[in-house]
Amino acid sequence: MPATTRRRFTDEFKREAVRLIRESGRPVAQVARELEISDNVLYRWRSEQQQIESQGGTRQSVRAEQDELTRLKRENETLRKERDFLKRAAAFFARESQ
């Protein structure tokens, strides 16, 4: 099976695609076919754009916040595992010393 590379789209392209949906009145699936992208991707871009507009930020700032949240969740999970391990180790050594 040949490896496919992931297509990358500029923020300008994403904004224009969302603008096409809003201004043309055509269904998302039709616009997606015309742009040769998945309609799921276009739905996601539209929801991201709505989120950006409601927060008054930029696409980069929202993406940075999402990346930071993902990083913090990952770090939180690691710290939770370390804490649980140390609890078990402390209980083990407490039993051994008795």
Image: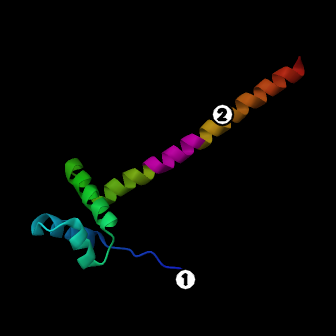
| Magenta region | 69-77
Q: Which of the labelled discs sits on residue 2, or is there none?
A: 1
With 86 as the anchor, is 15 left or right in this view? left
Image quarter where the N terminus lies is bottom right
Residue drawn at point x = 14 percent, y = 63 percent = 22
Image quarter where the C terminus lies is top right
Mark 2 = which residue? 83
Q: Eyeballing the image, is 32 above or below 87?
A: below
Is any part of residue 37 visible from this angle? yes
Amino acid on which disc 2 is placed: Arg
Residue 60: name its quadrant: bottom left
Towards the viewer: 46 or 60: 46
Residue drawn at point x = 33 percent, y = 64 percent = 40
Residue 41's spot in the image, x, y percent? 33, 65
With 26 as the anchor, is 52 left or right in this view? right
Q: Eyeballing the image, is 24 above or below 57?
A: below
Q: Name the residue at the bottom extreme.
A: 2
